[in-house]
Image (cartoon, rainbow, N blue to C red):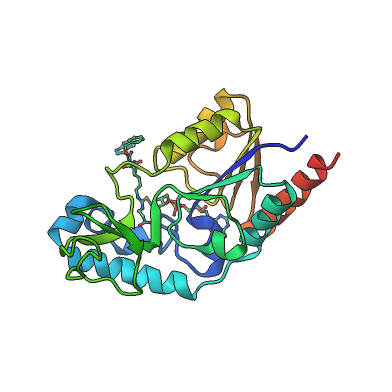
Amino acid sequence: MTPKIVILTGAGISAESGLGTFRDVDGLWTKYDLNDVATPEGFARNPELVMDFYNARRANAAAASPNAAHAALARLEVDLQGEVLIVTQNVDGLHEAAGNRNVLHMHGALDSALCNACEHRWPAPAVMSVTDPCPRCKQQATRPDVVWFGEIPYGMDVISEALSQADVFVSIGTSGEVYPAANFVAEADHFGAHTVELNLDPSAGVSRFAETRFGPATEVVPQWVADELARAQK
Ligand code: BV8
């Protein structure tokens, strides 16, 4: 039987690709106040600061390569005939670069731009500026297409439906500090999924997982994928 697998990823899966996490030692939130750079209020107060923050992360993400953990998840999607959905909190494009096709960016993506006036979306330029006119309505109302604190994450209905049907829910490289993502394990468990945490350290929600494996994602994710593929082939 091919299991339906929902995989939640966070900054930890991209850490070994050189992209910073948020809450680890010297993480992004130790250098920036998230209220200044990851809230609509912060953007209204100082849009240039926010554009600079995301321009720097966009440049880092563009220079990064997928690691063995991303590659293992791409293998899983191919070998399990697409019963795999990746719900990522990450705004980098490393899952797609590794070959995954079924990826939902619930917190948006660095490579997308959004117009605050007409809600048009287009591929973000490498460097965004507050004076960029929207390609459609021409107003200077552009912003990074990311979900800030206090904003509604993307794809919540698709995610809820997938969690209700999942046989396996895996959480990789996330601290479990940010909602609603931090609640997905409880939703999946409620519907009878086997829940797995693959993380460097125990997350805030560790006690809610049926199975936990700790270590760097480039070690624990390929091993878990190999075990899952062996199980699925029985
Ligand atoms: C919403 C923008 C309503 C893009 C981000 C009080 C209590 C509870 C909740 C709230 C509250 N007050 C407000 C809230 C809601 C709020 C929230 O959860 N706040 C928290 C801080 C308390 N949430 C929201 O506002 C969300 N919206 O709730 O709307 C709603 C909800 C549902 C339906 C309708 C309406 C919006 C949240 C999105 C905010 N935007 N980012 C960007 O700039 O990237 S959040 C930011 O943190 C990132 O996006 C990231 O995705 C997210 C989570 O961080 P992690 O990915 O987990 O990274 P972190 O550094 O924390 O952890 C890294 C982990 O990796 C660690 O565990 C570490 O051990 C591990 N690791 C490190 N290295 C490795 C590794 N693992 C493996 N291998 C390694 N090598």
Residue 91 drawn above or below residue 191: below
Residue 222 in the figure: left or right of residue 192: right
* Residue in the picture at 66% in, 63% down: 68
Task: Look at the image and tell me whether residue 216 can be seen.
Answer: no
Image quarter in which the N terminus is found: top right
* Residue in the picture at 48% in, 56% down: 11
Residue 89 in the figure: left or right of residue 199: left
Residue 39: x percent and y percent? 24, 51
* Residue in the picture at 29% in, 46% down: 149
Residue 119: x percent and y percent? 26, 52
Residue 104: x percent and y percent? 49, 48
Residue 146 in the figure: left or right of residue 21: left
Name the foreground residue: 35 vs 101.
Answer: 101
Residue 196 in the figure: left or right of residue 11: right
Name the foreground residue: 65 vs 220.
Answer: 65
Quarter assignment of residue 139: bottom left
* Residue in the picture at 49% in, 37% down: 159
